[in-house]
Image (tube, rainbow, N blue to C red):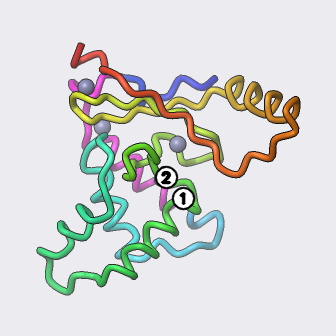
């Protein structure tokens, strides 16, 4: 299990650094895969990284709408698809919203801890959970198509 910085408390950290790291990682990941992080894709990623809370697609559209030359919804949805495909953002199914990946440099299954008070979403990447799920699926002869492990509750700051 990797000890991700995302587990640090949401408050009292240098968020500008989170954003900078996320954008640097995105550039590196795209360069390595020969994918293009266009200005819009980068911008959508930045909007998602404004906080550690999950953001809904319409909120991204709303924020873009205030800008000159705002992108049309299909373009924004395609940008989101791209960011998800490259593991730069995750979709939090139970919130129907998106959150920046805290460790996008390698592919992983993520497990999410979602604070219902402040909305902060933290991820861990614990391979033993993934393995346990795979073992269970094998035992049941179950073909897993989507994996979401999302836990709701109160974060350390909100308890
Ligand atoms: Zn941060
Ligand atoms: Zn992740
Ligand atoms: Zn909280």
Q: Which residue is mark 1?
A: 28
Location of residue 130 (image quadrant):
top right
Quadrant showing the N terminus:
top right
Give how far across and how far down residue 56 sits, in percent.
Answer: 31, 56
Q: Are marks 1 and 2 in contact (CB under 8 Å)?
A: yes
**Magenta span has 156?**
no
Judged from the image, the secondary structure of the residue bearing numbered disc 1 is: helix
Residue 158: assigned label: none
Seen in the image, is 142 located left or right of residue 38? right
* Residue depicted at 30% across the width and 20% down the height: 154
Element class at badge 2: helix
Which range of residues does the magenta coloring cover? Answer: 9-27
In depth, the one of 125 and 97 nearer the eye is: 97
**Disc marking residue 25:** 2
Viewer-proximal residue among 37 and 97: 97
Decide if ligand 2 comes within 8 Å of the CB at mark 2: no
Query: Could you tell whether 44 is left or right of 104 in the image?
Result: left
Q: Is residue 23 magenta?
A: yes
- For the C terminus, the quadrant is top left
Q: Position of residue 39 (x, y in %)?
A: 36, 76
Q: Residues within 10 Å of mark 1 (few under 14, many from 20)?
A: some
Q: Position of residue 89 (x, y in %)?
A: 46, 53
Report the predominant secondary structure element of the magenta stretch.
helix
Residue at the far left in the pictured view: 66
Residue 69 drawn above or below residue 77: below
């Amino acid at each position: 299990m990797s000890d991700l910085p995302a587990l640090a408390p949401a408050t009292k950290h240098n968020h500008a650094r989170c954003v900078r790291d996320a954008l640097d990682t995105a550039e590196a990941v795209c360069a390595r895969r020969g994918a293009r992080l266009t200005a819009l894709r980068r911008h959508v990623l930045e909007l998602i990284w404004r906080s550690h809370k999950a953001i809904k697609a319409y909120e991204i559209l709303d924020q873009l709408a205030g800008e000159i030359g705002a992108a049309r919804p299909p373009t924004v949805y395609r940008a989101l698809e791209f960011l998800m495909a490259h593991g730069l953002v995750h979709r939090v199914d139970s919130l129907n919203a998106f959150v920046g990946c805290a460790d996008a440099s390698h592919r992983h299954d993520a497990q999410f801890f979602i604070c219902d008070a402040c909305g902060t979403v933290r991820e861990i990447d614990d391979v033993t959970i993934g393995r346990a799920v795979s073992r269970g699926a094998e035992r049941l002869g179950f073909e897993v198509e989507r994996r979401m492990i999302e836990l709701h509750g109160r974060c350390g700051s909100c308890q």
